[in-house]
Image (cartoon, rainbow, N blue to C red):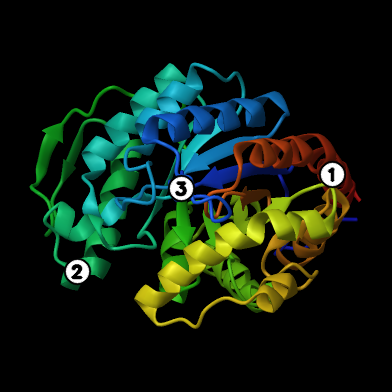
Amino acid sequence: MSPTPDAPIAPKPFELGLYSFAELTADPRTGHKLSPAERMRNLLEEIELADQVGLDVYALGEHHREEYISSAPEVILAAAAARTKRIRLSSAVTVLSSDDPVRVFQRFASLDLISNGRAEIMAGRGSFIESFPLFGYDLHDYEVLFSEKLELLVKLRDHNPITWNGQMRPALDNAGIYPRPLQDPLPLWVGVGGTPESVVRAASYGLPMALAIIGGMPERFTQFADLYRRAAREYGHDPNTLPLSINSHGFIADTRQQAIDDSFPAVQVVMNKIGRERGWPPMTRDQYEASATLRGANFIGSPDEVIEKILFQHKLFNHQRFLLQLSVGSIAHDKLMHAIELFGTKVAPVVREEIAKRVTA
């Protein structure tokens, strides 16, 4: 059966991976809080295990808050590169609006050389705003900063030397940008939280898109996948060649009940803190359990339940990658390591095999 025009063909096996914000919060059960050094050691062990069990991607978010230790993801990913062999190493996301695209490119090009061609950039506007005043940017320029800097980052990736002029950064006149990465071009994804403007922007550049679904029914996000592919075609790009990633929260344990019991206290602390900042109501256990159902946003359950949910969403989105954030809040390291093992050894092989059948059917 031939694919329809709006059904992208996966150029390689379906990819599964993890992303983290490298949380540093107290254990909600014991009140104990790891030192930053202990959390960093655990994080590197988690990335190393993800590689060993065959996951395809590990991505780190950039945050400048007390409850996270990943303000410089590229540094941590470079350390992980020395301890891993095949897993791809990405940001999730690089807050491009408050950074310098030249330095972003140079840092990830360096990571690409260290990792022997496994680096990726996932650029986005970020879920928090602390980096703007920290680095001297005005939030009133929120939109233009990201739009202009993404344009520059794409040109830096594709051209060297480069001549460029914009509003928010000094001009570049036949400037050479070094080092150059091993991969040509260096993979660049755009992280999107669900605004049509961001979707169209990613499509206009012909860049892969990572769509975050962390609340609500997944079906309501299909409009963004459809818009992305439609806009890509209108801008002259073949949507069949553009990967789409779905990025979501979740947790895996031997049983659904165990997954909920292990993860809910930590997730509740984090989401309620953010809720107080943004005016959301407190999260309840009933809401969390509802999100773990097939049509909920979170991938919480046994390996079989997570498999079912990934395959259900693949029918909705026909995406090429799925990234799961296991550690929304501080969960015991041994439980997190077990979740990674289950994801890599139980979930990933079944999902890859089933989706491969769909693609070739």
For the residues marked 3 and 2, what is the alpha-carbon distance in whole angstroms?
25 Å
Task: Give the mark, 3 or 2, whose residue is nearer the N terminus.
Answer: 3
Residue type highlighted by circle 1: Ala
Please tell me which residue is depicted at 48% across the width and 54% down the height of the picture: 206
Q: Residues within 10 Å of mark 1 (few under 14, many from 20)?
A: some
- Cβ–Cβ under 8 Å for marks 3 and 2: no
User: Label 3: which residue?
Assistant: 23
User: Label 1: which residue?
Assistant: 356
Which residue is nearer to you in this view: 226 or 326? Answer: 326
Residue 345: x and y in percent read: 81, 34
Residue 203: x and y in percent read: 48, 61
Residue type highlighted by circle 3: Glu
Which residue is nearer to you in this view: 237 or 118? Answer: 118
SS at badge 3 = loop
For the residues marked 1 and 3, what is the alpha-carbon distance in whole angstroms?
34 Å
- Of the 4 image quadrants, the one containing the N terminus is bottom right
Task: Give the mark, 1 or 2, whose residue is nearer the N terminus.
Answer: 2
User: Label 2: which residue?
Assistant: 139
